[in-house]
Image (cartoon, grey):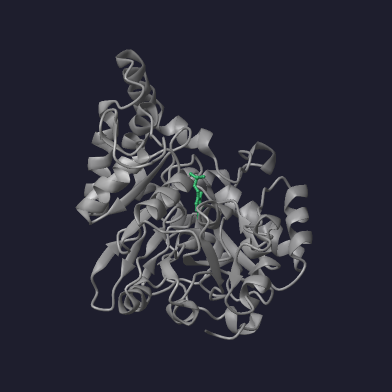
Amino acid sequence: MVPIPSMKSLTTASHDNYGFHLGAELYLHRFMSTASMRKIEMVDLKAQYRKIKPEIDRTIQEVVDSAAFIGGKPIQDFADELEAYLDIERVVPCANGTDALQISMMALGLQPGDEVICPSFTYFATVEVIALLKLTPVFIDVNPETFNVEANEIEKAITPKTKAIVPVHLYGQSANMEEIMAVANRHNIPVIEDNAQAIGGDFVFSDGKKKKTGTIGLIGCTSFFPSKNLGCYGDGGAMMTNDDALGERLKMIANHGQRVRYYHDLVGVNSRLDTIQAAVLRVKLKHLDEYIAARRSAAGYYDKAFAGHPNIKTPFRAKYANHVFHQYTLIVSEKRNELADHLKANDIPAMIYYPVACDQQKAFEGKGRNAGTLEHTRWLSERVISLPMHTELDEEQLEHITKTVLSFYT
Ligand SMILES: *Cc1c(COP(=O)(O)O)cnc(C)c1O
């Protein structure tokens, strides 16, 4: 793994395209006072809804009229459409991303005491389900540039008890799945991708072939939480796999272990995507690529504004991935918390994802094992800050955000 890089070397990281185009409408915004500027949200779901309101209102009304709130036709339609979008055999919807991870681990038949290799630098849900099933999370460090786990760290943590590997495509950029799958296959260990932050992202193999994130491991898990890149208007999640028998098992476990009603072959859970959420997702899936483009465009603006800054390191863009920017996360050299306060004082929300790594959470005392010192995880926990990132950021807002960040370090 690369040593903790100095800020100087980090600022020279290359970026792909900036891709920010100044539309005529946005151009006019520049001459308006900031007093008239739209309020900056971390995620602006209201503005996004306004643009698709007729489609959304119509589809929700149809579900209400049909009264098929559970198990309605839009659920299977959405699963079929997501299968086509992702180019995968099976999409199994469920109630949320956390359930997707839990059901996946149940379907693999993991037993108490089995070890699951995962990052500590992730959202708590990834590792919570490991503990819930009485499995042992084995925390590995992340690469401080990509924020993701790497194959060599995974390989070092493998023991005879290792029964699954859970890479997380953090902030919307794929981990190096080609290398991770090579290690996993060599040791015959299944990979569950936590794709909650990266749906729609691509991974590019060294032969140039592309696959969607979440479709490379044995199972991919995602969340449709409203603020995710493909979000519904409540809770939702899904699992995806190319293994048909496993897909059937995932579906059964999500539905009380039954294939035929009232005949329970397995002990499962009750984890359903409801019809209204599926109907909303069918509409939003059609816009997903456009939403990703909007996020990448805002990221390009940020990249340009902060390029070469001595205190600010913009997100690394891996050659093997198409970053879908669930979050736009900076690494700052100093005064991270003061910067967050400064932004808040200027009506700009900012978030720290995540201030406390999973292995240091109170809930994990005595429950996990750290493979190594997790020095990059510690280092990042003190230096990351995520700026507003969503599909509706306009030039005026981006200018205000970047100027406010830059003014803090001068
Ligand atoms: C959001 C998220 C989850 C959990 O999804 P929910 O739908 O909120 O249960 C799991 N892992 C990661 C990395 C996430 O960002």
- The vertical placement of 96 against 176, above or below, is above
Q: In this rendering, would 71 be left or right of 195?
A: left
Q: In this rendering, would 350 be left or right of 199?
A: right
Front in this rendered view, residue 210 or 265: 265
Residue 119 x, y percent position in the rendering: 53, 67
- Quarter-of-image position of residue 206: bottom left
- The vertical placement of 230 against 282, above or below, is below
Quarter of the picture holding the C terminus: bottom right
The residue shown at (43%, 36%) is 232
The residue shown at (54%, 69%) is 138
Q: In this rendering, would 236 be left or right of 404?
A: left
Front in this rendered view, residue 357 or 380: 357
- Quarter-of-image position of residue 238: top left
Front in this rendered view, residue 376 or 395: 376
Residue 65 x, y percent position in the rendering: 32, 13
Q: Residue furthest top?
A: 65
Front in this rendered view, residue 218 or 114: 114
- The vertical placement of 159 against 135, above or below, is below
The residue shown at (52%, 84%) is 1
Residue 128 x, y percent position in the rendering: 56, 53
Residue 178 x, y percent position in the rendering: 33, 74
